[in-house]
Image (cartoon, rainbow, N blue to C red):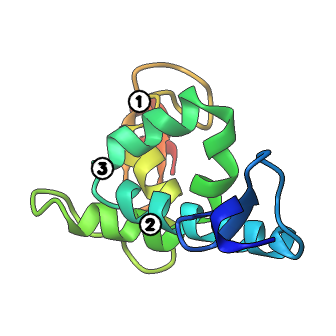
Amino acid sequence: MDATSSVTLFGIAQFDTSGCLSRGAELSLVSVHFRLRLIGLQVLEYLHPIDLLHLYHAVDRFKPLLREGDVLWRHAFRNFGDLVPVPDGIEGFGFAHLLFGVSKCEVCGSSPAHTNLTHQCHLCESCTFER
């Protein structure tokens, strides 16, 4: 294949004029996927944590990425000075859920429930006094 009959996508994967991958380009697609995922993570860092939480609940494809991306959540919290940073010992996703998630008591299920940072859960008034 000569240089005039192929095209390089983002300097990574090479395609011939029929749109087929050039030989050895399958390995390059793994690199493309990795780079796109990395770029996506870098973009997501600039969202507010509540927006990340909404994205988690709205788009199933983002769930694995957002569940495992503790660094992403910590950056998102750090980018907004009016938010408390993620404390040590809790994952960023869990902390976002604690602050912005459904206000339902995790003991008895009643609503509304207050965010209890000491116990890292939502508790209604009666369950708060029992602890």
Crowdedness near tag 1: few (<14), some (14–19) or many (≥20) residues, C-alpha within 10 Å: many
The residue most toward the right is: 23
Distance between the alpha carbons at the discs numbered 2 and 1: 27 Å
| 55, above or below 84, in the image | above
Which image quarter holds the N terminus? bottom right
Q: Amino acid at mark 3?
A: Leu
N-term mark: 2 or 1 = 2
N-term mark: 3 or 1 = 3
Q: Amino acid at mark 2?
A: Leu
Q: Residue 80 appears in which quarter of the rendering?
A: bottom left
Q: Amino acid at mark 1?
A: Ala
| 24, above or below 22, in the image | below
Front: mark 3 or 1:
3
| Residue under label 3 | 47
Q: Is residue 20 visible?
A: yes
Q: Secondary structure at mark 2?
A: helix
Crowdedness near tag 3: few (<14), some (14–19) or many (≥20) residues, C-alpha within 10 Å: some
| Residue under label 1 | 113
- Residue drawn at 55 percent across, 73 percent down: 11
Q: Is residue 48 left or right of residue 118?
A: left
Q: Is residue 44 left or right of residue 80?
A: right
Distance between the alpha carbons at the discs numbered 2 and 3: 10 Å
| Residue under label 2 | 72
Distance between the alpha carbons at the discs numbered 3 and 1: 26 Å
- Residue drawn at 23 percent across, 69 percent down: 78
Residue 102 locus on image (x, y percent): 46, 29
N-term mark: 2 or 3 = 3
Q: Secondary structure at mark 1?
A: loop
Residue 42 locus on image (x, y percent): 39, 65
